[in-house]
Amino acid sequence: MDMLIKAGLVYPVSSPPIPNGHIAIEGGRIRAVGGAADFGSSSSGPVIDLSGHIVMPGFVNAHSHLQFASARKKFHPDSGFVDWIRQVIAFSRAVPAREREEGMRAGIAEMLASGATAVGDIVSDPEFAKPFVTAKIRSVVFIESIAPDPAEAQTIAENVMGQVDTLSQMGLKAGISPHAPHTVSGALFKLLAKGAHALPLKLTSHVAESAEEDEYIRNGAGPMSAFFEERGIPLANAKGMSPVRLLDSYGALDGLVAAHLNLLDENDLQLLEKRHAAPVFCPGSSRWFGRERVMPFDRMIQMGLRPALGTDSLASNGALSMLDEMRSAAVYFPAHDREKIIEAATLNGALALGLDCGSIVPGKFADLIAFRWDGRENPVEVIFSATRPDFVMIGGTAVLPWEITGNGKRTKRNDR
């Protein structure tokens, strides 16, 4: 055994909490978890004493765009979604490479400090993935494509697959992200979905995010249509169907990590469940845009779907904190069990991204966080009211340090 963690309460997520719980870690993974009596009175390896804390799996941020991390407070949604897109395009063209990279590194540090130990991040070029090579956070990096012209589909698809190879050569876990059904042609969606399923790689997309998108896909009209026309982009024919059904017609809905899903009907929900899609709710972004209609999180759970949580980007959110996202989700769904929101922020995100973490189970990575707890407070409320964890561990290595005893090993305690 490499290490033993003693906790006031182990909160595994996938099973009931364990008072005075212990977690044995070996080779960066959880070897065993149980009560103190299951482990005996001594340990041959280092011991981390978190007896005054709740220890739980680290948060998994299932949808982010860290290449916009230097965009904090530079955008506003007041004039509508299409105008916000114009702002994003202008920022992307103007931001210097060094500022982008510094922003990404700062964004990763912000995520870690708020307890996110894993992230699914979307980049438009492998060059923007460099910060993840040395970052402590666990990641899946998705290559994004925006290409509404079907004439470009084959060329773009080949380029994306080459970029996936580049990410793999960088030592990163790669995924594919056709941006959205209104910005990617059906021909390209089909090619990328086929490529992702064959490898296999995770496929993610923005789906049913805005009313403008919905109107454009169903009717070929509205502000999105005018935006494409002014930019000389070939307009799609009206599909007369929802974004969800459109993606299903492309063969792209199977296992899709589908972000936002704000505008759904019951048929859409049934189709998402049938195709085993992985919904990702971004409540902070929805609040930033002032949206009243958002992903039907509670209905999805009733159906057996497993919605995850994501921060989206600092172009449409004020922070990159999963704790904030959980609180925002609770604002939208105040009557819903908060345990399910915690599950969405941990286990469901890991399942969506195909990562071996998100719950405290033997065999999974030792990606853990801890919050101070006096033994009397409701642990769920302690987690929801926290501003940041007191301890963060990824793969058995403490990211935020703590006192470690045993075998003469000791690190500086984090006494914030």
Image (cartoon, rainbow, N blue to C red):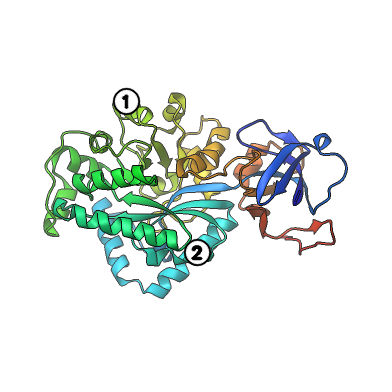
Residue count near mark 2 (Cα–Cα under 10 Å), binned few <14, some 14–19, many ≥20: some
For the point 68% across and 54% down, the residue is 391
Residue 399 on image: x %, y %: 64, 59
User: Which amino acid type is shown beneath numbered disc 1?
Assistant: Glu
The circle on residue 266 is 1
Q: In screen coordinates, is 151 left or right of 252?
A: left
For the point 67% across and 30% down, the residue is 16
The circle on residue 173 is none
The residue singled out by tag 2 in the image is 133
Residue 188 on image: x %, y %: 22, 49
Residue count near mark 1 (Cα–Cα under 10 Å), binned few <14, some 14–19, many ≥20: few
Find residue 247 and report its image quarter. Answer: top left
Find residue 200 and report its image quarter. Answer: top left
18 relative to 88, above or below? above
Which is nearer the eye, 249 or 329? Answer: 249
Which is nearer the eye, 47 or 224? Answer: 47
